[in-house]
Image (spheres, rainbow, N blue to C red):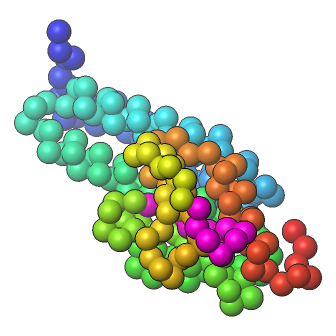
Amino acid sequence: MGATKMSGSELRNKVTPQLSEVINIQDRMLQPIADPRQLSPLIEEADKSVRATLGTLVQHAPKTKRSSVVISIGSAQTYLRTARFERLTKICLALPGVRTENIGNSATFLVDGRTFAYYLSDYRGNGITGVCCRLRSGKTPKPVLSAMSPWFNPTSGALNGWLGLRLDRSAIDWGDVFDLVQGSYLRVAPLSTEL
């Protein structure tokens, strides 16, 4: 038995509060915080709210309105990418002496002129969005990575010794992101830098 379809105005009335909640969560995520890990509950709440809104749209949209649902899904995915980039930026900029350079859909995070992290969107045209950071040794490990793995090896020769963590998955362990970024930062930051 299919779900009851709603008229456009009924659907708009149902999802408007849900979308308002997503915007409210984003506003709370943009507030100054002492510890970047405090964002974890907010990003989880945002993911749930966006998923609930998309579920409502898919379930109740009239068949003739499915193209607008697809556009809404694309907008929600763009929102999540933006929210995750903003969260990564907060984590990086909370570290002493960090500056960022945005280039198109990607960003470079530097300390003392040395790069310690890259935010990559649609990396090498393969659809991957993630953060790449330096590892301890000069060699990139070759772990067995499955399609479901959150980790990836950058294929660029310039990123030898770097490891990527995907930010385009439904569930992200922000503790892993923080640890990866902080470890990379400490590898290139001046020795006098204190966290």
Q: Position of residue 126 (x, y in %)?
A: 32, 63
Does residue 52 sit above or below 152 in this rendering? Answer: above
Q: Closest to the observer: 111 or 31?
A: 111
**Is 74 situated left or right of 193 in this image?**
left
| Residue 78: in magenta span | no
Residue 55, horizontal then vertical, whole percent: 33, 30
Residue 107 in view, yes or no: yes
- Residue appearing at x 10%, y 32% in the figure: 63
Q: Quadrant of residue 109?
A: bottom right
Task: Between residue 78 and residue 108, name the one nearer to us.
Answer: 108
Q: How many marks?
A: 0
137 in the magenta segment: yes
| Residue range corresponding to the magenta coloring | 129-141
At 55% across and 75% down in the image, what residue appears?
160
Q: Quadrant of the C terminus?
A: bottom right
Residue 13: percent from left, percent from top: 32, 33
Instruction: From the viewer's side, name the closer residue of 20 and 148.
Output: 148
Q: Is residue 85 visible?
A: no
- Residue at image location 52% in from the left, 41% down from the top: 171
Residue at screen point 51% across, 82% down: 158
Left or right: where 54 falls relative to 180:
left
In-front residue for pair 123/93 = 123
- Does 141 sit left or right of 112 as displayed? left
Q: Is 129 situated left or right of 72 in this image?
A: right
* Image spot of residue 67 (x, y percent): 14, 45
The quarter in which the N terminus is drawn is top left
Judged from this view, the residue extending furthest toward the bottom is: 113
Query: Residue lying farthest left?
Result: 64
